[in-house]
């Protein structure tokens, strides 16, 4: 618009003064103040949770302004801060952005599987000089994938597995990509494997996550884990310890399991449960049958089998992908599921009696799927009729046999040894399968949703439960099922077969016998110690992994918590398992009943202020040992030892609505007890959210 103070001088054009973005002084000509400017470099920014002091260059120019220019930012995601910057009226400087470990949580969904690794907020740089304000948009991306990260050579202490597909991405579950694979020692001095191979994406829900799991098929069969130094408990006739020769192996990503250890832990427990010698033994094959008891040892010795594994650092086409678990796949083999493998020509009545490897699987991905009378979908893993044509004699036999077994289990005479379930199922394998799944609180396996394997050998009337598989969503790592709480019933009530089995007094008595044998011989104690030892061996690799995938402090599906440290995640896992074992021990054994009361401090609670929780145990035999754990919405917050009959724990509660409970672990004479839930609201703090150290 025109300044009324400006006049026309001769033929000179009229001076137009723009007021929308300029602050003007009176007068014209040399008295005009030039438009202020604000420059921000770069024009967009990516930050990783936990990253500190990310530099953003800012230059400002406010002509003839003598005061300071204050630079701030607005629209920042949660957990990201930018310290205010003060500049001269014509000056430049650096804004430093810092992100907490949980920065940007609102952009990462926790209600379902997501492949998203980033989201962008509409942040703005604001410069104020007196009453004048300038703004520059600065899109700010929060990312939980850092593909440019590669660990230093000195920071690698695990075997290195390198896949080369000449740049072709591995993105499909059904289309194989050809390439090569090489595995060397951490120092590169020893080569364990150098072979051509094909690769495809493995898994169901995990196949939709950013860090993909893979299945690889080698050109040659090899005892890969044994070659790499793993001591499996199987031996050849010459006395040499071996694992298993195979072409197929799986590379588990463990993206949603921040301990990287839940699958490893389940296998470690399953392989520690022996047969005989004080433990339940497998049912002898009845006389008149020429079959034998399947055993993965490949000899007459009865031994357990669950997948063995080693951890590696994975590189794909030269790029570091993180820590992976190189694991044996569940398959028919002399040192895995050791049953007679059927061929297409095996159609006689004697040969079709086995061997079958099956999976209770709601995904129904197998070529042949049948449904039991109770509605369970069971897919045939082996024999595999893809792409081979179905053999009707085989599918008809196994469908009818499993149907008969389930009918016997749910019949009125189900407890009868000849007419009931015992005529069809091996009890020891069913109980061992139960113990591993229920101790681990396995979500999918515990409800017979998926990954529940069973098999039948030739000329052997029994169905064997197992092997175990797929435990990433277990041990409290779930935000959509009640088993996030380690003190709730699970497999005994949620699995139709196990609910029925546990209604049989004989089965229940045998399950308690097996449980107490494991407790007495220290299996659980040694197992928990082995988890901590394995975690310690991964300290360097986990640091590499979470530099590549910086999401330790974020909840991604199905996490109910995100402590923010690897050691904290391991503590959460072990604490959860300790509580689960104590809970199951209490329901299996008649111990003196106890009660526990939770007391909270009076007054308002704030997320930034430490809170002391107190629990008192009463009842029982009056002499208590053990621990007390405190739960928030079923998630363990921490554990403290009893001092007499009382226990206290100081921690920081997360903001929001909480239902707090205290759990007494019980001891050799006193039963576990759970306090009444106390509801409370914790006010948010103006500071960055702090999380309890598990």
Image (cartoon, rainbow, N blue to C red):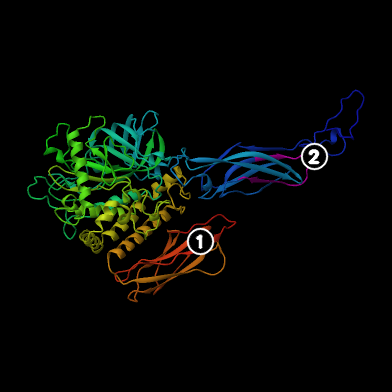
Indicate whether residue 59 is drawn in magenta: yes
Residue 294: x percent and y percent?
16, 46
Q: Find residue 652 and name its label.
A: 1
Q: Secondary structure at mark 2?
A: loop
Q: Secondary structure at mark 1?
A: loop
Q: Residue at x 7, y 47 (%)?
A: 288
Q: Could you tell me which quadrant the N terminus lies in?
A: top right
The answer to whether one can see residue 335 in this image is no
Q: Could you tell me which quadrant the C terminus lies in?
A: bottom left
- In the image, 658: left or right of 472? right
Indicate whether residue 477 is drawn in magenta: no
Q: Find residue 458 and name its label.
A: none
- In the image, 433: left or right of 150? left
Residue 678: x percent and y percent?
48, 65
Residue 226: x percent and y percent?
24, 43
The residue singled out by tag 2 in the image is 23
């Amino acid at each position: 618009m025109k300044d009324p103070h400006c006049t026309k001088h001769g033929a000179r054009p009229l001076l137009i003064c723009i007021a929308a973005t300029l602050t003007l002084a009176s007068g014209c000509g040399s008295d005009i103040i030039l438009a202020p400017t604000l420059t921000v470099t770069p024009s967009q920014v990516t930050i990783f949770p936990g990253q500190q002091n990310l530099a953003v260059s800012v230059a400002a120019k406010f002509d003839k302004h003598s005061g300071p220019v204050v630079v701030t930012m607005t629209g920042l995601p949660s957990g990201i801060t930018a310290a205010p910057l003060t500049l001269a009226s014509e000056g430049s400087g650096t804004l430093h952005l810092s992100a907490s470990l949980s920065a940007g949580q609102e952009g990462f969904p926790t209600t379902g599987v997501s492949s998203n690794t980033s989201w962008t907020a509409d942040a703005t740089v604001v410069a104020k000089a007196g009453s004048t304000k300038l703004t520059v948009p600065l899109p700010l991306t929060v990312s939980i994938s850092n593909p440019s990260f590669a660990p230093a050579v000195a920071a690698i202490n695990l075997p290195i597995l390198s896949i080369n597909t000449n740049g072709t991405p591995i993105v499909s579950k059904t289309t194989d990509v050809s390439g090569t694979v090489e595995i060397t020692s951490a120092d590169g001095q020893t080569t364990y494997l150098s072979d051509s191979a094909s690769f495809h994406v493995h898994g169901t829900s995990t196949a939709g996550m950013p860090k993909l799991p893979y299945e690889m098929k080698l050109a040659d069969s090899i005892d890969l884990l044994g070659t790499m130094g793993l001591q499996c408990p199987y031996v050849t006739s010459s006395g040499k310890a071996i694992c298993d020769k195979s072409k197929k192996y799986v590379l588990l990503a463990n993206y949603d399991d921040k301990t990287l250890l839940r699958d490893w832990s389940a296998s470690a427990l399953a392989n520690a449960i022996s047969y005989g010698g004080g433990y339940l033994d497998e049912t002898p094959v009845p006389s008149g049958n020429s079959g034998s008891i399947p055993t993965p040892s490949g000899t007459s010795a009865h031994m357990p089998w669950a997948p063995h594994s080693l951890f590696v650092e994975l590189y794909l086409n030269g790029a570091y992908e993180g820590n992976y678990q190189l694991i044996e796949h569940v398959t028919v083999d002399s040192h895995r599921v050791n049953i007679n493998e059927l061929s297409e020509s095996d159609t006689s009545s004697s040969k079709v009696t086995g061997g079958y490897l099956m999976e209770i699987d709601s995904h129904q991905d197998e070529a042949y799927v049948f449904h039991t009378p109770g509605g369970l979908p069971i897919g045939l893993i082996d024999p595999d009729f893809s792409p081979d044509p179905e053999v009707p004699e085989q599918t008809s036999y196994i469908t009818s046999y499993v149907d008969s077994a389930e009918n016997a289990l749910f019949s009125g005479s189900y407890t009868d040894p000849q007419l009931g379930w015992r005529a069809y199922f091996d009890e020891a394998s069913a109980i061992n399968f139960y113990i591993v799944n229920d101790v681990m609180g396995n979500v999918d396996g515990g409800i017979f949703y998926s990954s529940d394997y069973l098999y039948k050998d030739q000329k052997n009337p029994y169905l064997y439960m197992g092997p175990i598989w797929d435990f990433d969503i277990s041990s409290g790592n779930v935000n959509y099922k009640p088993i996030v709480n380690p003190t709730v019933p699970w497999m005994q009530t949620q699995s139709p077969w196990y609910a029925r089995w546990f209604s049989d007094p004989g089965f229940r008595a045998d399950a308690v016998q097996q449980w107490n044998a494991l407790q007495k011989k220290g299996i659980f104690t040694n197992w928990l110690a082995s988890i901590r030892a394995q975690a310690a061996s991964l300290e360097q690799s986990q640091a590499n992994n979470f530099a590549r995938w910086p999401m330790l402090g974020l909840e991604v599906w199905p996490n109910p918590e995100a402590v923010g440290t690897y050691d904290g995640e391991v503590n959460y896992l072990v604490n959860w398992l300790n509580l689960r074992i104590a809970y199951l021990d209490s329901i299996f054994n008649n111990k003196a009943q106890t009660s526990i009361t939770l007391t909270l401090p009076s007054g308002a609670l704030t997320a930034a202020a430490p809170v002391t929780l107190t629990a008192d145990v009463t009842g029982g035999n009056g002499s208590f040992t053990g621990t007390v754990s405190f739960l928030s919405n079923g998630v363990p917050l921490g554990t403290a030892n009893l001092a007499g009959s009382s226990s206290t724990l100081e921690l920081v509660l997360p903001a929001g609505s909480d239902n707090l409970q205290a759990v007494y672990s019980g001891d050799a004479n006193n039963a576990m007890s759970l306090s009444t839930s106390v509801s409370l609201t914790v006010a948010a703090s103006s500071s960055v959210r702090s999380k309890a150290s598990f």
